[in-house]
Image (tube, coloured by chain):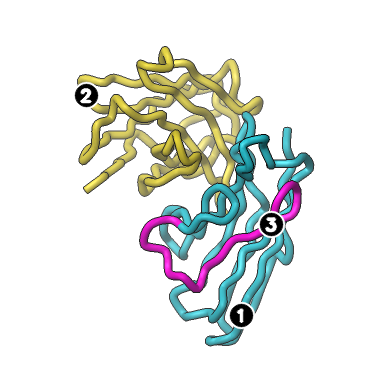
Chain colours: A cyan, B yellow
Amino acid sequence: DIVMTQSPLSLPVSPGEPASISCRSSQSLLQSNGNNYLGWYLQKPGQSPQVLIYLGSTRASGVPDRFSGSGSGTDFTLKISRVEAEDVGVYYCMQVLQSPRTFGQGTKVEIK
Amino acid sequence: EVQLVESGGGLVQPGGSLRLSCAASGFTFSDYYMDWVRQAPGKGLEWVGRIRNKASSYTTEYAASVGGRFTISRDESRKSLYLQMNSLKTEDTAVYYCARWRTTLDYFDNWGRGTLVTVSS
């Protein structure tokens, strides 16, 4: 199975400040078609997860442009340019290259 | 509007069985792959399994932790997804979400609100 490792696991951020979450996979998620098979999801308190980024760097419909995904192969980053109060929750990376699909442990973002 | 509504959760004893349902509406259910994802209390997300659509012969995949005990099925006429859970263990205690898979772009684009399964004596 592909192991996904996120860091940090907890991230206190002041409003308006940037935030960055790292995700590393135990195998390359880059395919010959140039796609990285990695997504980012946010689970807000008391809610179901929602997609933010797919295929490594494509922002899903309706996701604010302060969210961006980057990286390739085994190293990926989710960046929030300016954190807002509504961004609190747990962020998960997920590899979709192969079965079983696997998630990172989650990174809890909270407002200072 | 796409809606996924899970039901069927509850308290069950170890070794028991339970069947979860996910009612889909607002989209052409038969076109999509559908997955189950679970979340143990206070823990992260764990993929449980998938059922593909008719075009992909309704093939299924499972996580090793549930293979041989859980079965995913679907009823196109009822626009429903099912998770039959047998030989339940305490570690199966979790909120179970159904999720719609966006095949060409490879991500979950809609999730239900989940149903809680508690396995305890």
**Disc 2 sits on a residue from what chain?**
B
Q: Residue at x 61, y 37 (%)?
A: A33
| Tally of numbered discs | 3
Q: Residue at x 64, y 79 (%)?
A: A12
**In the current view of this chain or complex, which residue is farthest to the top?**
B57
Asked which secondary structure carries label 3, the reply is strand
Separation (CA) of disc 1 from disc 3: 18 Å
Vertical placement of residue A36 versus B23, above or below: below
Residue A13: x percent and y percent? 61, 81
Q: Residues within 10 Å of mark 2 (few under 14, many from 20)?
A: few
Residue A4: x percent and y percent? 71, 47
* Residue B36: image tag: none
Asked which secondary structure carries label 1, the reply is loop
**In the current view of this chain or complex, which residue is farthest to the front?**
A33
Q: Amino acid at mark 1?
A: Pro
Identify the residue position indicated by label 3 in the image.
A71
Tell me the quarter of the image containing the C terminus of chain B.
Answer: top right
Identify the residue position indicated by label 2 in the image.
B78
The magenta stretch is A60-76
Q: Residues within 10 Å of mark 1 (few under 14, many from 20)?
A: some
| Discs 2, 3 touching: Cβ within 8 Å | no
Identify the residue position indicated by label 1 in the image.
A18
Q: Residue at x 36, y 62 (%)?
A: A62
